[in-house]
Image (tube, rainbow, N blue to C red):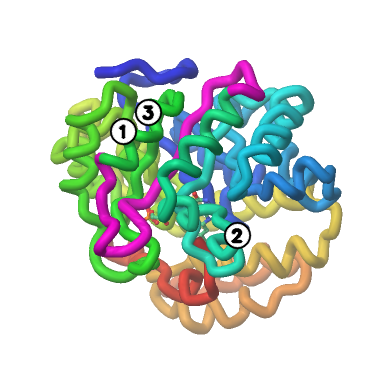
Amino acid sequence: MPAFPYSVSHEVPLFLAPMAGVSESPFRRLCRRFGADVVVTEFLSAEGIRRENEATLSKLRFGPDERPIGVQIFGGEPGPMGEAAALVTDVFQPEFIDINFGCPVKKVVRRNGGSGCLKDLGLVQEVIKAVVRSTHLPVTCKIRSGWNEEMRDPVTIGLRCQDAGVGAIALHPRTRTQMYSGAARWEEIAKLVEALDIPVIGNGDIKTAEDAYRMHRETGCAGVMIARGSFGQPWIFDQTRALLAGKPLPPPPPVAIRFDTALQHARMVQEYEIDPVGAALEFRKHLGWYVKGLPGSAELRKRLHQVNSFDEVEGIFSDYLAMGTHGDLPDDEHQLDVELLEAGHA
Ligand SMILES: Cc1cc2nc3c(=O)[nH]c(=O)nc-3n(C[C@H](O)[C@H](O)[C@H](O)COP(=O)(O)O)c2cc1C
């Protein structure tokens, strides 16, 4: 098995995927506590970083308990990508820098950022080389399988990235045109593993710990990256670790512990965010995910989606527990959250 370019605590590390608006510092810390071995920031614009845009730089803050952490940057121009990588290296010193070649959002791909770069593999290589030249840290990247069906060729893309100097690569095996439709083609992860000398991290459609275990078994990927499957269930990492260690699947926590976790998460957000009202509004989506699948969750969700402060949340949870109607959760309660994707996220 090829070695990761940064140190990891398990032979098969579990990654919390980069996710705009979700994999922020508090959620990354929470997932690390629940067994994620490596976390990655949401994608940050190279332009924003090199211009020292306040909002962008504030998203670069992370704590020591998040390490090992990668900072993900995007942009379609080698020069600014190099400058951004140099600044991140000097000021924030993460374990690695990850380049986003996967984001399908229009305003990003229009300027050749994200998966927009995949139309021109020469440009992909120039971007990687510029970043590698500008930092002493390992450089990794995250790709999709291609721009569209005609250009679908994850192995060629992966080989070009490897030649240009990345030390590991994560594949989300869909094309840009697919956005999130269809199924992620895990067999493409297996092909990439076979073709490359660097570690390949598998990603896509992991909804449960069993899925994560199966992806590793079926593809031989060096690491497993979970995105939407972590929503409202950060314990998916511990569950996956148990399966990889040959142990039985730990059951999901009971409702009261689930609520405690949500409150713990909320407190971490409160400590981290500067604007308490904005933070509470942003946190509503997490609350919705934590209660998904509970008996009577539609009503509960409705109340939680109206909170304007974190103080209200505890009361809503207590009311629900006092009703005593909750049972244990069905195993299949966590479906992929399509709503978010329709809202235009990567
Ligand atoms: C809300 C949201 C935001 C995302 N933001 C990013 C991002 O900033 N960078 C990135 O490389 N991928 C991003 N992605 C893509 C995920 O990292 C992942 O590749 C994709 O969701 C497939 O994995 P999954 O099936 O486990 O969700 C995002 C996905 C979602 C749902």
Q: Residues within 10 Å of mark 3 (few under 14, many from 20)?
A: many
The amino acid marked with disc number 1 is: Leu
Which quadrant of the structure image shows residue 107?
bottom right
Label 1 CB less than 8 angstroms from ligand 1: no
Question: Residue 100 appears at what percent x and percent y?
Answer: 52, 46
Q: Considering only order in the chain, which callout, 2 or 1, is on the residue closer to the N terminus?
A: 2
Q: Where is residue 216 in the image (x, y as percent from the top left)?
A: 22, 37
Please say if the residues under marks 3 and 1 sit with CB atoms less than 8 Å apart: yes
Q: Disc 1 designates what residue?
A: 159
The magenta segment: 133-155
- Amino acid type at image mark 2: Arg
Residue drawn at (17%, 30%) of the image = 194
Residue position marked by numbered label 3 in the rendering? 162
Label 3 and label 1: CA atoms lie apart by 5 Å
> What residue is disc 2 on?
111
Q: Name the quadrant of the N terminus.
A: top left
In whole angstroms, how far apart are the C-alphas of marks 3 and 2?
Answer: 23 Å
Q: What element carries label 2?
A: loop
4, 130: nearer the viewer: 130
